Amino acid sequence: MPPKKRSHIGRHTAAAAAKKAKRSAINASAVAAQRASEDPQQRATRLATNAAVASYDAASTASDGPETRSKRSAINASAVAAQRASEDPQQRATRLATNAAVASYDAASTASDGPETRSKRNAINASAVAAQRASEDPQQRATRLATNAAVASYDAASMASDSPETRSKRSAINASAVAAQRASEDPQQRATRLATNAAATAASTFSTHSHDSDQQRSTFQRNSRRRGLTILTYIYIFKLKQFTLTFFLEILDSLDPIHVSKYLEFLTSRDQIIIQITKVCRPFYDDKFLKNKVMKPLLEAAYLRNLEKKSLTQIPKLGKAKPVPKTLYEEPSEFKTLYSLKKNNKALAEEHLKELANLELNCADPTLKEKTYLKLREIENERNKLLQFNKKKCISLPKFETPTPIKMTKAAVLREGKVHLKEEEAELKWLEELEKGGKEDRQFVKWQNTMKEQDMKQSMLELEKLRLKSKIIREDAILAKEKLQEENRRTVLQLKQETEEMLQDYLQQQLEEEQQSKKVVQEVAESQKTVNDAKKKVHEQKKKIVQDVQRGKQELNAAALENATIEMEKRLEIIDRIRVLTATQQYHNTKLFDTTETSGLGLLSEMSLAELQERLAVMKRWEQEDQEKKRYEILLSKQKQKEAIKEDSHSKIFDDEINVLQRLLEEKRSRRLKCMQPSSKQNSRKSSPHKQTGKYMEQEDSCKEKVIKDIHVTFYPTAREQSR
């Protein structure tokens, strides 16, 4: 582009900017002149209208949805940002100057206003701002703060990006605007400005030192408010008739309106007064007294005050009753119209019937054609074919002894085909190798296969030998266990017999002593002649007898103790051996009772626990034999199936050693079963009770019974252990 054209474009833009600046300055001066010429009433109306418009905008924004609010705030913010981004530095300077001039003029006008207009304007502005901020939701608040922050940041950025010339111009414009404002103000405005500045500085300096004085002032205000409210309550309750209502209202106007409104709400609400009275009177009076003497009269008086007073002498005048309507005794017109319509419809129906009776019905001929009859017969025959009332039952398939041939699936056929192909390929390779000069290894392969079969047979024989040996060892262990149990039972029986013999000897000794004492008594009776000598003899004889008896008792006690200790040691040794043998078994603590006794109910199917155990053992033995037979049959069937699949007739593995081992196993099983039978019979024996003779005998019997019970628990297994 040539330099002439560039200079021409720059001049054109500069002229346009100068025109815009002039226009904005003219508008600002017009606004300032208009606001300077208006009186205080016009200013108050202008501010009130602005506040009303702001409150209306706030209400409209509050009634909108969140989406519309966010859209509107975004549009406003974008419009302001676009406007400020498009303006040049001169326009920005003029905008800031006009804003400063308007703010200074508003400050001067507010300073020149009276206290009433200033307080009204402040109240209107505060109410508008409070209503606007109370109505906005959190999203609006966030957008407002974001727009303010964006505008402030944009102004700061624009000021920082300005050149020194524009800054100096802006400061000069601001200074000139302030100087023009201060030159145009009258002495009263200057005095108010200086007074406001001085008050602001004094308040800022005094705010740091006035904390204590504020607390004192707040307490003084609270006390004065309480005193005023107490005076009001006294006048309202007691002296309202003496003073006029206007005087009472003037007192209310002089106080704080918020506290007065709360006070009047409290006085007019009956529930709050009742609650307050109960709170005050409850610590001093009983609840019944409060209800009957304080609260009930107040509530009844309020209710009676609202009731109308009835005169007992005069009769009350009642209102006239409404007369009965004439239409009550007349039929409505709707019924008449319905009756007439019914008659007309009936007449029309009769006419239609007459017309139809005169007409001949050609379509009512009941005869059908031959084709229709044939079709109906075909349909009936088809339906009869579907019926199956006399159908013959199917005959079941015969049970063939020979197994049915299994059908080969496609996969099995393919597998067999692959196997045959592999065999053919192997034979072809072998023939090719023979043609080339290879050796025949068929004999070696046959020999190798025979050796493998022999090795397999030997391994199978060894496995069967091991299995039979393990079974024989198990049978030997069972027999050894049964032998131990029989030995223990024999020892117990011997101990029982020895104890019985000892008791019989002791009883015989007591009988002999009684006979001797009887003889002595007879001799004493015969020798009554010599009483003194007889007494002495008897006394001496009694002493001797007592001494002999005591000696005999001591000897018997010592012998019994020695025998008991020896027996107990033997029993403890036997018990220790049994516990060592049966350490792995788990014994259950069961009550001791005679297993051979029945319940005694008199039923036909009664049996004792021992008999039941024997029968259960027999049943379990049968079940085990059946299971072994089934297992043996299953194994045989599996072996046959394997032989059929492999198509190799393997010879059964029978050897002399295996036969010998099997015979040994069967013999030991038969011996074990024979040993089981007498053990069950011994369990069925009952223990006979002994006669009790004296306290000493009872103690000995109880001790022996305890020992026998312990031995019975250790030696005789329970029903569950026998089943195991």
Image: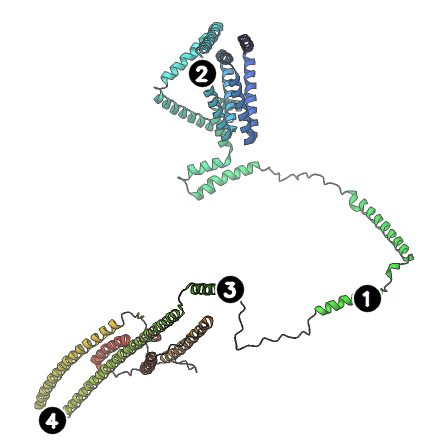
* Label 1, label 3: how far apart the Cα atoms are: 65 Å
Q: Earlier in the sequence, mark 1 or mark 3?
A: 1
Identify which residue is drawn at 46% across, 28% down: 234
Circle 1 Cα neighbour tier, 10 Å, few/some/many (<14 / 14–19 / ≥20): few
Image position, residue 15 (x, y; %): 55, 8
| Mark closest to the chain's N terminus, 2 or 1 | 2
Judge from the rendering whether residue 234 lies leftward or rightward of residue 71; answer left or right.
left
- 586 and 426: which is toward the camera: 426
Q: Residue 330, percent across and down?
A: 80, 46
Q: What residue is disc 1 on?
A: 373
Label 4 or label 3, whichever lies nearer to me, is: 3
Q: Earlier in the sequence, mark 3 or mark 2?
A: 2
Q: Are marks 2 and 4 in contact (CB under 8 Å)?
A: no
Query: Label 4's element?
Result: loop
Quadrant location of residue 654?
A: bottom left
| Residue type at numbered disc 4 | Ser
Q: How many marks?
A: 4
Which mark is nearer the camera, 3 or 2? 3
Location of residue 329 in the rendering, given as x and y in whole percent from the top left corner: 79, 46
**Residue that carries the numbered disc 4 in the rendered image:** 527
The answer for how far apart the CA atoms under marks 4 and 3 are is 130 Å
| Depicted 179 relative to depicted 702: above or below | above
User: Badge 2 is on which residue?
Assistant: 161
Residue at image mark 3 = 417
Q: CA distance from mark 1 to mark 4?
A: 147 Å
- Which tag is nearer the camera, tag 1 or tag 3? 3
Residue 632 placed where, x, y %?
41, 76
Residue sitting at x 27%, y 72%: 582
In this view, the residue in front, 711 or 694, is 711
